[in-house]
Image (tube, rainbow, N blue to C red):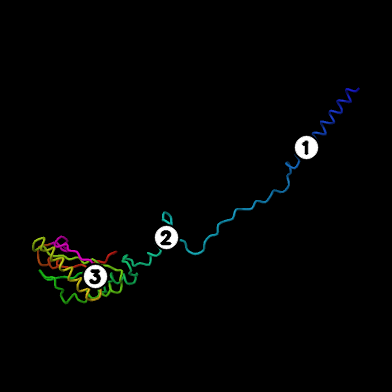
């Protein structure tokens, strides 16, 4: 009888312990409403047009936007409207070649208006620069023609300088007979080769 009573007491103790354990774990099994999750903030989309900058170094986008204001020819310090004048066939600025008589480097009166127009253009655009390329026809020695081409380039530079262009805006070079504009061995070709060309840097 005592043994049965002892077993009953032990069983009751185990049952009470189990009930206590289940009450302790009950909060873990709570199936109440799920806790709301706050969504991550979405980055604000900047307003206004954006510039594609893939592969550009920092600051390159700003530089590319500033370059957009240059003339289409890329001539430094010349805006689009003024650069267009250099390509307009109706504008004297589109004329870039000064021709010379045989064995001469004096500028003929026919080209004074052309030279004055380019001199004034340089005067109005202090950052623009030109290369004056002197040339000769094939008659004479190579050395003589190199010197003659240089004199022709220098004569154009001197005239433009008198008319207001700065010396630092103009560079001279001679090709002698090495860069003929026309192939041939007659006066029709030679008269096209006796020349100074006005080339704007950046075109």
Q: Residue furthest right?
A: 1
Mark 3 Cα shell of 10 Å, populated few (<14), some (14-19), many (≥20): few
Numbered label attached to residue 61: 2
Q: Depth-wise, is mark 3 or mark 1 nearer the camera?
A: 3
Q: Which residue is farthest left? A: 140
- The image quadrant that residue 195 belongs to is bottom left
Cα separation between marks 2 and 1: 67 Å
Percent from the top left, x then y, of residue 155?
17, 71
Q: Of the two numbered discs 2 and 1 on the same chain, state the one appearing first in sequence.
A: 1
Q: Marks 3 and 1, Cα distance to the nearest angstrom?
A: 100 Å
User: In the rendering, which numbered label is found on residue 40?
Assistant: none
- Front residue of 74/157: it is 157
Can you identify the residue that label 3 sits on?
167
- In the image, which residues are magenta? 169-183
Q: Circle 1 sits in a helix, a strand or a loop, which is it?
A: helix
Question: In the image, which disc is placed on residue 22?
Answer: 1
Location of residue 196 in the rendering, given as x and y in whole percent from the top left corner? 18, 68
Q: Secondary structure at mark 2?
A: helix
Mark 2 and mark 3: Cα distance apart in space: 35 Å
Q: Nearer the viewer, residue 42 or 182?
A: 42
């Amino acid at each position: 009888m005592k043994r049965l009573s002892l077993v009953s007491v032990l069983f009751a103790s185990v049952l009470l312990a189990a009930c206590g354990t289940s009450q302790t774990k009950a909060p873990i099994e709570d199936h109440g409403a799920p806790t709301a999750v706050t969504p991550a903030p979405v980055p604000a989309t900047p307003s206004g047009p954006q510039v594609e900058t893939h592969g550009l170094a920092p600051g390159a986008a700003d530089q590319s936007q500033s370059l957009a204001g240059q003339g289409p020819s890329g001539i430094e310090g010349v805006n689009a409207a003024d650069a267009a004048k250099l390509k307009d066939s109706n504008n004297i600025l589109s004329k870039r070649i000064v021709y010379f008589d045989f064995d001469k480097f004096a500028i003929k009166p026919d080209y004074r208006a052309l030279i004055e127009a380019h001199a004034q253009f340089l005067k109005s655009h202090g950052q623009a620069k030109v290369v004056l390329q002197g040339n000769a026809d094939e008659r004479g020695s190579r050395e003589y023609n190199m010197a003659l081409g240089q004199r022709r380039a220098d004569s154009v530079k001197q005239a433009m300088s008198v008319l207001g262009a700065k010396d630092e805006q103009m560079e001279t070079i001679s090709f002698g007979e090495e860069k003929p504009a026309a192939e041939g061995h007659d006066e029709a070709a030679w008269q096209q080769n006796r020349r100074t060309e006005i080339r704007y840097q950046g075109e």
